[in-house]
Image (tube, helix red, strand yellow):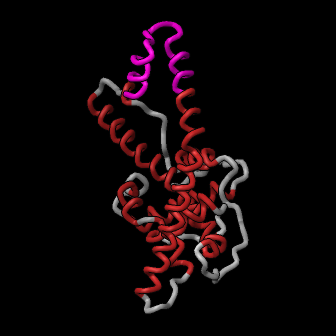
Amino acid sequence: MLEELIATTAGLKPGKEYFEKLRDLISSYRRDWAQQYLSSYLRTRAEGEIWGAAKDYYKRTYRRAGKPPTVKQFASNAVKATNHWFGGDIATLYRTFGEKSPVTPKRVRLMLPEPRTLVDCIYVALGGTQESWSNLSEDPREAEVQEQRIEDNYKKQDLANLALEYVQLQEALGHQPDLKSLGKSKFEKRAEAIVNNDMDKAWRVYIETIERCTSSSESEVVDTN
């Protein structure tokens, strides 16, 4: 691992002050890297995402015989650039590559001030539990049940994190995104952890959970059963 390589190179040996010295050493390397490369890195990232969105816009325009894509058609591939660099204002993204925006969005912030709060709310509301592989029961049958819960927890955690993308899309579009806009394959791989063998019901439960968590000022966990 990188930490082990750095420690070996610096001559650090395991001991009482090992981790503190290693932490400070890694922080020093990070500061040096940031001073030299962070600005160019961020500029490259921004240009890459903006150019990617613009390329998608013109590709869609060409395929539609010169007719620009609708905001809904464009937004799914523009969401990263819009949220990363323009604070969710898709009209500014349009102007960046010289096109007139068909909409003038009014910013409505749906994301909680601390996104982690939203993720935690959704995880618990979907039935996520705090279990560990290290605490499995010695009873084989009970252990099997625990293992399944843990596997489901991984999927529920992924769904909770995916909710951040859902909210970002909702802010950009001005309405609830559908499953296709969010990414059907990303959801389907994990949906059985909500409702097995019923994709439509799982999607309804999922968006209801997101809406309740985002609308609750105190992020109160709700019962989705």
Q: Nearer the viewer, residue 34 or 140?
A: 34
Please identify the quarter of the rendering in which residue 188 is found: bottom left
What residue appears at the point 43 percent right and 54 percent down from the top-left corner? Answer: 194
Q: Main secondary structure of the magenta part?
A: helix
- Residue 20 lies within the magenta run: yes
What residue appears at the point 36 percent right and 42 percent down from the top-left corner? Answer: 151
Answer whether residue 176 is visible to the viewer in this image. yes
- Residue 195 lies within the magenta run: no
Answer whether residue 207 is visible to the viewer in this image. no
Marks counted in the figure total: 0
**Is residue 205 positioned above or below 139 on the image?**
below
The stretch of residues the image draws in magenta is 1-26
Q: Residue furthest left?
A: 140
Q: Residue furthest front?
A: 36
Q: Position of residue 164 (x, y in %)?
A: 56, 55
Q: Position of residue 153 (x, y in %)?
A: 43, 43
Please identify the quarter of the rendering in which residue 97 is found: bottom right
What residue appears at the point 71 percent right and 66 percent down from the top-left corner? Answer: 108
Q: Quadrant of the N terminus?
A: top left
**Is residue 158 positioned above or below 144 on the image?**
below
Q: Position of residue 140 (x, y in %)?
A: 26, 30
**Is residue 151 positioned above or below 161 on the image?**
above
Q: Residue furthest top?
A: 16
**Is residue 180 positioned above or below 8 on the image?**
below
Q: Nearer the viewer, residue 175 or 152?
A: 175
What residue appears at the point 39 percent right and 39 percent down from the top-left corner? Answer: 150
Q: Is 84 on the left-hand or right-hand side of 8?
A: right
Q: Is 185 on the left-hand or right-hand side of 74?
A: left
